[in-house]
Amino acid sequence: MKNSEIEAQVRRAFTRATPDVLDAVLSDCQAQKGRVIIMPVEKPSNPWVFRFAAIAAAFVFLFLGAAGYFIYNRDNAVASTVSLDVNPSIEITANRKERVLAVRALNEEGRTVIGDMDLTGSSLDVTVNALIGSMVRNGYLNDLANSILVSVDNADPTVGAALEEKLAREINKLLANSAFDGAVLSQTVHPSSELRKQAEIYGITLGKAQLIKLIIDKNPNYRFEDLVPLSINQLSLLASSQKLQLDSVTSIGRASEKGLIGADRAREIALQHANVSASDVVKVELDYENGVLVYEVDFVAGGFEYEYDINATNGTVIKHDKDTIVDIKSSDGTRTPRATPTASAYITAQRAKEIALAYAGVSTEDVREFEIELDDDDDDDDEIGVYEIEFKAGGDEYEFKIDARNGTILKFERDRDDDAARSASSHDDDMDDDDDGDDYDDDHHDDDHDDHDDHDDDHHDDDDDDD
Amino acid sequence: MALSLTSAIEYRHDTDPRLLDVFLEAIARGDKAALTELYHRTSASVYAFALSILRNASDAEDVLHDTFVTIFTAGATYRSQGKPMAWILTITRNLSLMKLRQESRTSELSQDEWALMADEHQGLTADDALVLHKVMQNLSDQERQIVVLHALAGFKHRETASLLKMPLPTVISKYNRAVKKLRGLLVRGERQS
C-alpha cells in the first residue's frame, strides 16, 4: 500500500466521521452579532440646555433620516444582474457595491445548487464562489460537463465588461483547483424586450437566451425552443463544431467532449456501416436533431453519396441515406438520362420486400401495414426505378428506398412508431383516440426516445460506478 | 469513471489559501454565506485535528463548533499571510489544549464504540471505523496529529513543524514511522476482514 493510499483511507474515515454542526455554528453566530452595548447616559441638569439639545437632535435625525433613506434606496437598487448557467441556471442581482440583493434559481437543478444557503447581503465574489463550489459538490460541473456561462447585465457597459472579466477570471481560478479542466464562457448581456420575453417564456436566464439567439443567428436551422434544454457544454460544442463565430462571447478553456464519442469515432462508425474503406469524408459535424446530439457524417465513395446521423453519445446509427450521384449534366444544361431501364430488368416487389426485411432483421409475420410502391415515373425527383417501402414492426416504423434494378438499399430510416408506443403505454385509455391535438406532444416524446440509447447509457453508468 | 466523484471530494477539501482568504475577508464583514462555504471546506480538517489532540469524539465536536464561532467573531483580527489554514488550525489547537487542561481526562473510544458510531453515522463504513480506531489507538499523539495535518489539511511538513512547534526533522521522522505503522495495521486489518 502506498503512502497516498493510506492517507486517502485516513482522510476518508475522518471526513465521514465529522459531525455536521454548521446549523449550531450559524445560530450561535447570530446570537453574538446581536450583542447590544448600553452606554450610561447622564441627565442634563439645565432644562433649557436639554430643550435646545432635543431640538438640535431632532434636526440631526431629520437630516440623517433623509440621507439614510437616500443611501438605503441606492443600496437596494439593482445595478447588476449576473447569471450562471451550466445546466443549473441561477440569477444573482447585486447593487452598485456588488452586494447581493437576491439569488434566484431558474430550474430545479438551480434550486439544488442554492440549497438553503442565504446569500443575500454577501458580496458578489463570495456568492459566486459559494455557488460554483456547490455546483461541483453536487456534480453539475465535472469532467463530462465542464462549461459554465457567466453573463453580466449592467446599464453601464464599461462596468458590465469589467465585472464580466473579473468574474470569468475568478471562476476560472476556482475551476483550476478542481480535478478537471473547466471552460468558462462569458458575455455581457444587452437585453432587448424580445429577448427578455423569450427568457421569461422558457424560464431561462437572459444570458442563456442571448447565447441561444447568437447560435440561431448563425445557424437558422435551429428553433429557439429546441436549444433550450441543452446544457452550456452542449451549446458550446455545437457552436465550436459548426465553427459558428460567437463574437461577443469570450471563452477560456474548451468544452468537454468526454461525454461524446468524438468526430473520429463517428466517422469510423459510418464508414464501417457503409462497408467502405477510407473515403473522402466531406464533413463531420455535430448537430442537434429531434432532441438528440448527432454527428452528421457526409461522404462520397464508389459513386455514391452517403449521409449518416450517428448518435453522439452512444454511437448508434440513427439515420443513413445513400444516393447515386446524379448531378450529371451535359454542357447545355439538360439532364442526361440514365440508361433507361426496362421493367423487365427490375427485381420483383417480392424480392425488394425480402431485401428490406432481411436488412431490418424483421420476420414477415411481425410486419404490419406493409406498403410498397414502384416509383417509375420519369418525374423530377431523380428517382427512376426505385421501390419505396414503408412498414411497421415492433415499436418501430421503417422506411426503405431500394434500387429496382439491382436491389441496392438507397435509403433506410427507422423511427419510433408513435401509435404503437401510445397503445402500449396507455392500453385502456380511449380518450386519446379522438384527440389530434396532441400530435405535437407525441412528436416531442418520440424525439428523445430510442431503445438503443437507453441501453448504452446504462452501460456507461455502470462503468462510472465501478471505478 | 470516478473522476467526477473524486473531483467533488477534492474540491470539498480544497484549501487553496487564496480561496480561503476570500472567505475570511468576507467573514470579517459578518458574511455568513462565506462562513458556510469555509465550513464545508475545512470542517473535516478541524474536526480531525481536534480529535487527534483530544481523543474524544464529543469534546472534538465541541471544539469544531467553537472553532467556527471563534473564526466568525475573530475574523476581523485575521491578517492574511497566505496561511489561512494555519490560522484556523491554530485556533483549533488552542481551543483543544484549553479543553484538555479544563477536563484533564480523556475517555477514548474502543473499537466497539467506533463501530457503534459507524452504525449511527450515515456514510461511515465499518472500514472507516476500523481505520479511525487504528489511528486513534496505535499512533502516539504527535504521530497522529502529524498524519492528520498531512492527510486532511494538506499541510507540508514544514507547516506542520511550525504549527506544532517541533523541529522539521522530527516531524518527518515521526510521519514516516506513523505511516509505516499504519501500513502494517491496515494491511493486517484487511486480511482479517
Image (cartoon, rainbow, N blue to C red):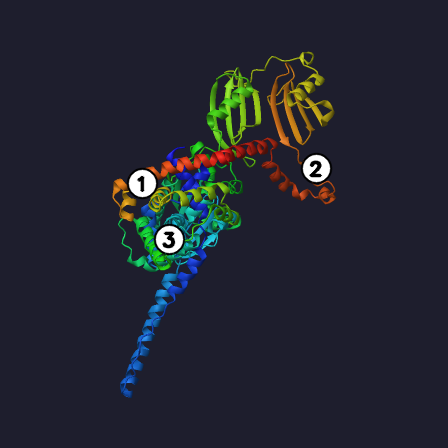
From the top left corner, tell me how far across and down residue A442 is, in percent.
64, 40
Eye-nearest disc, 3 or 1: 1
Question: According to the image, label 3 marks what residue?
Answer: A124
Decide if residue B173 is on the left or right side of residue A389. Answer: left
From the top left corner, tell me how far across and down residue A83 is, in percent.
43, 49
Q: For numbered disc 3, what is the local secondary structure? A: helix
Cβ atoms at labels 3 and 1 below 8 Å apart: no
Q: For numbered disc 1, what is the local secondary structure? A: helix
Residue A323 appearing in the image:
yes
| Label at residue A424 | 2
Identify the amino acid type marked 1: Lys
Identify the amino acid type marked 3: Leu
Sooner in the amino-acid sequence: mark 3 or mark 2: 3
Cβ atoms at labels 1 and 2 below 8 Å apart: no
Residue at the (32%, 49%) spot, across then down: B85
From the top left corner, tell me how far across and down residue A206 is, in percent.
45, 48
The CA span between labels 1 and 2 is 69 Å
Residue A218 appearing in the image:
no
Identify the amino acid type marked 2: Ala
Q: Residue A376 appears in which quarter of the rendering?
A: top right
From the top left corner, tell me how far across and down residue A124 is, in percent.
37, 53
Residue at the (69%, 35%) spot, across then down: A420
Report crowding for label 3: few under 14, some 14 to 19, many 20 or more residues within 10 A (C-alpha).
Answer: many
